[in-house]
Amino acid sequence: MPALVPFALALTVVLGVAGNCVDAAATLADCSLPDDTCNGIDDDCNGVVDDDGIGYDLDDDGVPNACDNCRYAANSLQQDLDGDGEGDECDLDDGLILVTLPDQNLVFWQQERPFTSFNLYRGNLSALADADGDGAADDYGACLDPDDASGGFFDSNNPLPGEGFFYLVTGIDPSGESSLGQASSGAVRPNLHPCEPRIFGHPPVIQSVTFLVNQQEFVQCDFTTVLEDWFCVNGIPGTHADPGIFLEGTYNRLQFQVRATDPDSTPEQENILLVSASFPDPNGLGEISLVLFDDASQNLFRVNQVANFPEECSEDPVSGSCECHGATYALSSGDLVTHDTVYTRNLGVTSAYADPLLIDCVRRATGQTTFQAPAGTNFVFKIEVVDRQGNLTAWPLSPSATTGQESLQCSGDPCGCCMLLPQPPAGCGGLPGMTSPAYPDGYCVSLP
């Protein structure tokens, strides 16, 4: 049964729930019940009337949990069309498809059972008329979004000043499409512009998008062996960094997690072809797409280090020979579990002037893809899912993030840190550390 939402109007109604005060209620309770039972009595004697084991009023609709027929969805009116004790706001098998408009362009509807997908219709309030006097309007609009299993749609169009849109949703199951329901008079609403079935399968369904931002993500890398072997390569074997050399820094970490499915997927083949988070290049070079994976981070993408200092070093303990060269780091998506319908990608963002050692440290320690943009850049992302038939589903909201300034410092051996970070070697003169048989007092102590 479809639902009509003529205006994007939200009503807030606060119900008064009768009950005794806590002290009086406690005198009537035997304290034997594990939770309250919506009787105005503190049955479990925990000092709160009509709460349950979860809380008092989780959805903040003015109705205590013990009395609320939808504890996780605000419904202060407590409407229950089929009288099964489950409110319409959370009842998915009462024949009512509730439609909500969170803002001017977003249309959401309930995933009512047993329907597998839904048709969304849009009409104009100014066009509603009942010329034949049968109690129903002559026309209830045209198909806007056919065969959609996502439960939401972004309508980019807006009504003209003084006019308004209304939306109707019908359900689709193996037997066909449900009707547009009945007008307030009881007359059946005619469907003059039914949605056409999709020829190339159903579009993917984006169930949820989680976007996390940390402007001060901490990262640490141990460069002790790298610098000791670098000294060896440069003719100073046996150099020892005490207590070690550790790069520490902060950067911007963005994480995308998109839960997506496709009705046409089978146990043998996943029908989703691509999940992406796209954003305009801050340098004005078009659009950049970041591919998300549901792969338990098994796909590896190798990239070369960006710093000039060689970060891959080794020493032969027998011959004492040393070798250093540029490092290659394996990047991954950051996804935790394969084939769980959650597509993941982590992105590390630093400023355009970030020390290359910080970028390499992020790649080395986390396996995250890195991107450089000026601090204070505002990224706006577009989340899209494409299936093998070319059907595209876009998330109606655009996650955004403004990047902060990164930081980098070195701790441990003073001489080694000074030699590692970009500055003239002469500026390290006199610092302790990096001792060796050739420089028992420390290499930097020998510098002028």
Image (cartoon, rainbow, N blue to C red):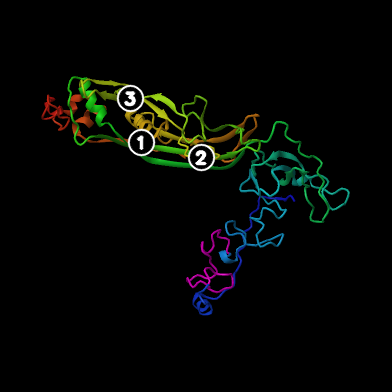
Q: Which residues are magenta?
A: 33-62
> Badge 3: how crowded within 10 Å, few (<14), some, or many (20+)?
some
> Badge 2: how crowded within 10 Å, few (<14), some, or many (20+)?
many
> Disc 2 marks which amino acid?
Gln
**In the image, what residue occupies the spot 71% across and 55% down?**
94
Extreme residue in the front direction:
318
Please tell me whether residue 189 is drawn above or below residue 320 in the rendered image.
below
State the separation of the CA atoms marked 3 and 1: 17 Å
**In the image, what residue occupies the spot 53% across and 73% down?**
43
- In the image, taking residue 344 as reference, residue 409 lies left or right, namely left
Q: Is residue 64 visible?
A: no
Report if the CB atoms under discs 1 and 2 are less than 8 Å apart.
no
Front of the two marks 1 and 2: 2
Give the mark nearest the N terminus, 3 or 1: 3
Q: Which mark is residue 406?
A: 1
Q: Nearer the viewer, residue 175 or 24?
A: 175
State the separation of the CA atoms marked 3 and 2: 30 Å
Q: Is residue 107 visible?
A: yes
Give the mark nearest the N terminus, 1 or 2: 2
State the separation of the CA atoms marked 1 and 2: 24 Å
Dominant secondary structure, magenta = loop
Q: Quadrant of residue 151?
A: top right
Q: Which mark is residue 257?
A: 2
SS state under label 3: loop
Q: Which mark is residue 307?
A: 3
> Badge 1: how crowded within 10 Å, few (<14), some, or many (20+)?
many
